[in-house]
Image: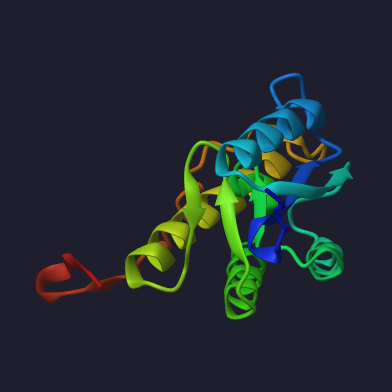
Amino acid sequence: MVTTETSESTAIGYTRRSHESTERTVSLSAQRSAIERYAAEQGWRLAAVLEHDGISGGKRSRFAALDAAVKIHGARAVVCFSLDRLGRDVVGVLGWMSSAARRGVALHVVGRGVVEVASSSGFLGTTVEAMMSEHYKAHRQLNTSSHHAAPYSGHPEPPERPQRRRAAGRGGETARL
């Protein structure tokens, strides 16, 4: 029996880690292995794995490289280890996902499956997850910046309350304004 591969069974993998990665960060090779297993479980040919090492999740230029790989290989799916590996920029992630969906390209996350933004619930869930990733990125930047003396607690200091003037009332007593 002769089988022909179609773009329907072709996927692109995407791995990323930022330059601020630590020992707790999932390595690129571990991400790649998980993506390869996932693609095999789906019966897909993994045409390529795009690897971005030392690239911030807030850099939108990586989406152009991903789009080029999808186009070259005629892929219909992009597989990443987790949504935060795709990016830590809400607008960028949602914009890319919407654009990819219009071109017939689905995003899959290892261990989770397809992630969509076409339905209200899919859009809301993905937005919240992407917002948390973006917040985490901002939180890490605040904690690692040398110009901050204390780590970011997640709650800004309340503004100092302005002093209120007191006006003299009858009999010399003061009333708060």
Residue 88 visible in the displayed image: no
Residue in view at x 78 percent, y 43 percent: 16
Q: Quadrant of the C terminus?
A: bottom left
137 and 90: which is toward the camera: 90
Image position, residue 94 (x, y; %): 58, 68
- The colour mode here is rainbow
In the rendered view, would you say 83 is above or below 153? below
Choose top left, top right, bottom left or bottom right for residue 26. top right
In the rendered image, the residue lying farthest to the left is: 171
In the rendered view, would you say 62 is above or below 139? below
Choose top left, top right, bottom left or bottom right for residue 161. bottom left
Residue in view at x 73 percent, y 29 percent: 33
Q: Answer with left or right where residue 121 lies relative to residue 118.
A: left
Residue in view at x 60 percent, y 74 percent: 104
In the rendered image, the residue lying farthest to the bottom is: 102
Image position, residue 127 (x, y; %): 47, 62
88 and 49: which is toward the camera: 49
Image position, residue 119 (x, y; %): 37, 72
Q: Answer with left or right where residue 156 lies relative to residue 45.
A: left
Image position, residue 175 (x, y; %): 19, 68
Residue 152 visible in the displayed image: yes
In the rendered image, the residue lying farthest to the top is: 23
Residue in view at x 85 percent, y 66 percent: 61
Q: Answer with left or right where residue 95 lies relative to residue 47.
A: left
